[in-house]
Image (cartoon, rainbow, N blue to C red):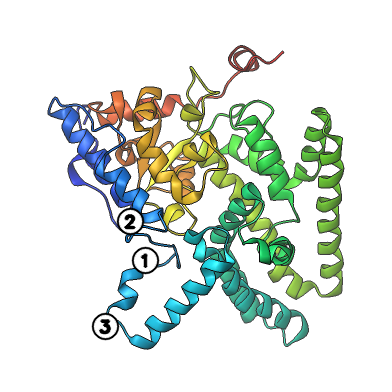
Amino acid sequence: MGGQEPSIVENGPDEAFFTPSDNIVLEELFKDIKDVKSGAKPTLGEDRPSLKLLDNMSDTKHPDFQPTIFSTWDYNLADLDNKTINSIRSAILRNYITWARTVVRHDTDVIFLSHIIMYFCTSVPSALYLFFGNFTYLHGIVHLLVTVWYSGGFTLMMHNHIHNNGVLSKPYAAFDWTFPYILEPLMGHTWDSYYYHHVKAHHVEGNGPDDLSTTIRYQRDSIWCFLQYEARFLLLCWFDLPKYFVSKRKYNLAFRVTCTELSSYACLYLVAKWQFKPALFVFLLPFTIMRIGLMIGNWGQHALVDDLEPNSDFRSSITLIDVPSNRFCFNDGYHTSHHLNPLRHWRDHPHAFLKAKERYSQEGALVFHNIDYLEITFRILTKNYMHLAKQLVPIGDQIGMTQVELAEMLRRKTRRFSEEEIRIKFGKK
């Protein structure tokens, strides 16, 4: 067992959630592994076929341009002119795509409009019926389950919205500004808190000691530490976030987030007092589930932190390929790429990753395949480092390490940092 090779190198990937971009990325990484094992060097250079393929898919002027229309399956624009496809369906899709590309800010982002239409055609009328129609527990439970299913895609759509100040084109700016205030409470978010916590705090601090969602002060394979982490966010976010802004002398942000957060709680209270049963399934349970889920995900994203350079984006976050987060949540698996450039368009992450793969290798970055953030959190908390090592895609010096060696490397990256270490490594006074 001690000399066992990581099975991913021999068995290849599970293609269950492949996006076309993930397929291109993994093919090149697997080729690099084989090249290094045979004594050759990994493929580099900006004229690589993989980079050209990814470029062409996002180039509106190229014949291979492909907007993302749906998350559950991929459609090639050329297929819409294929006579083997039902002509009515093809015509409907062609007209929808043509119109949608004028509505969204980027031609690639038809999927954002698809999601917005879906939410307003399902979640909104369902919520209204629960309050003003005939409430039943069956309907409430189904509504909650659908909301939980929607929550990942909606949250990552809003992730793009808050980083880029919207997702729709200028003629639709008023609706682009308005729709989050309608949909956020239905999906478990309080008004604007995601923006203030994620953009104005998390990305400013980068999982450092002042980050409200930092993991470095916790033993990250400890269930007890994880529960403390969850409880603090769930119960004290309303207090910690304004306090953080005050400590940074950003009094305007402190005032604004206090107003939006407390007004959200006040509305939840009043709606629950008015009709508790529908409020429970439409607002209260989604809110609780969302808050818990956000921190489970963030723990997985930032649990594996390098003990030598914990302030490096390459060494304090991870990259996931062939996962639901890329298929359904707009390439959220490329978390290191996102931290390196929070304004980078979600479709550009695979290209940016491959273009910088030599730097990723030199920095000892972690790349996983076929394991998403929720499972990473679970595997870390159960100390199943052998499974994590099995799902690791080795790059750089990791190539040639045994599964046991990789597992031990991952275990070391979950160690709690002492305040003295934090002072030294982050320059904290």
How far apart are the alpha carbons under marks 1 and 3? 18 Å
Give the residue drawn at x 30%, y 26%: 396
Above or below residue 254? Residue 136 is: below
Give the residue drawn at x 70%, y 47%: 195
- Where is the C terminus found, in terms of image quarters? top right
Q: Whole-percent x and y of residue 309?
A: 50, 19
Secondary structure at numbered mark 3: loop
Tell how many labels. Answer: 3
- Where is the N terminus found, in terms of image quarters? top left
- How crowded pointer 3 is (Cα within 10 Å; few <14, some 14-19, many 20+) is rated as few
Viewer-side label of 1, 3: 3
Which one is nearer the viewer's eye here, 306 or 382? 306
Which one is nearer the viewer's eye here, 372 or 361? 361
Above or below residue 266? Residue 392 is: above
Q: Which residue carries the number 1 mark?
A: 74
How far apart are the alpha carbons under marks 1 and 2? 8 Å
Residue type marked 1: Asp
The reply to whether discs 1 and 2 touch (Cβ–Cβ < 8 Å) is: yes
- How crowded pointer 2 is (Cα within 10 Å; few <14, some 14-19, many 20+) is rated as some
Q: Which residue carries the number 3 mark?
A: 83
Q: Which residue carries the number 2 mark?
A: 20
- The quarter of the picture where residue 138 lies is bottom right
